[in-house]
Amino acid sequence: MRLPDEQLRAGHIPADLYRQIPPGSDVRQVVIVQEAPRSYKGPILLTLAITVGSVVVLLVIAFVVQIIAASVVAVLSASCGIGYTITRKPKHKKALRK
């Protein structure tokens, strides 16, 4: 019997608990209630929910900014004649043969 729970299950009352029992009480009828171990399920789920929520909010903000930018370019090109083109340079330049 090394752990306090093993002592309590075997019916032995540790000295610090024995001092807390009121005088005149029948020790054989005393019930000792232990506090349940702490559960980490709630804080872990809360952290995951906050992380997932913040990622979703950032994705929605990025999507909205993209739509606004596309709308601004469309309005400017239609009203002012301003255009916006994206050109990609080829990765490999081919050598000119003569």
Image (tube, rainbow, N blue to C red):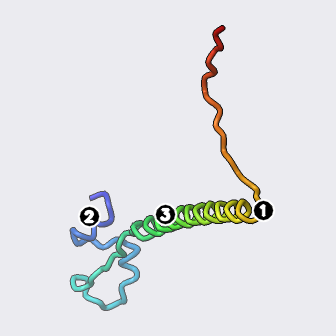
Res. 21 image quadrant: bottom left
Helix, strand or loop for disc 1: loop
Helix, strand or loop for disc 3: helix
Q: Earlier in the sequence, mark 2 or mark 1?
A: 2
Q: Which residue is mark 1?
A: 80
Q: Say few, some or many: other residues with alpha carbon within 10 Å of mark 1 (under 14 / 14 to 19 / 20 or more).
A: few
Q: CA distance from mark 3 to mark 1?
A: 42 Å
Q: Position of residue 79 (x, y in %)?
A: 74, 65
Q: Position of residue 68 (x, y in %)?
A: 65, 65
Res. 29 image quadrant: bottom left
Q: As displayed, is residue 68 above or below residue 98?
A: below
- Three-letter amino acid code at disc 1? Cys
Q: Quadrant of the N terminus?
A: bottom left
Q: Are marks 3 and 1 in contact (CB under 8 Å)?
A: no
Q: Which residue is mark 2?
A: 6
52 or 26: nearer the viewer: 52
- Three-letter amino acid code at disc 2? Glu
| Left/right of residue 16 with respect to residue 58 in the rendered view | left
Mark 2 or mark 3, whichever is nearer to me: 3
- Determine which of the numbered discs, if any, sits on residue 52 in the image: 3
63 or 11: nearer the viewer: 63
Mark 3 or mark 1, whichever is nearer to me: 1
The residue at the point 72 percent across, 53 percent down is 83
Q: Are marks 2 and 3 in contact (CB under 8 Å)?
A: no
Q: CA distance from mark 2 to mark 1?
A: 84 Å
Q: Return the residue found at the far top.
A: 98
- Three-letter amino acid code at disc 3? Val
Q: As displayed, is residue 48 above or below residue 87?
A: below
31 or 79: nearer the viewer: 79
85 or 56: nearer the viewer: 85
Helix, strand or loop for disc 2: helix
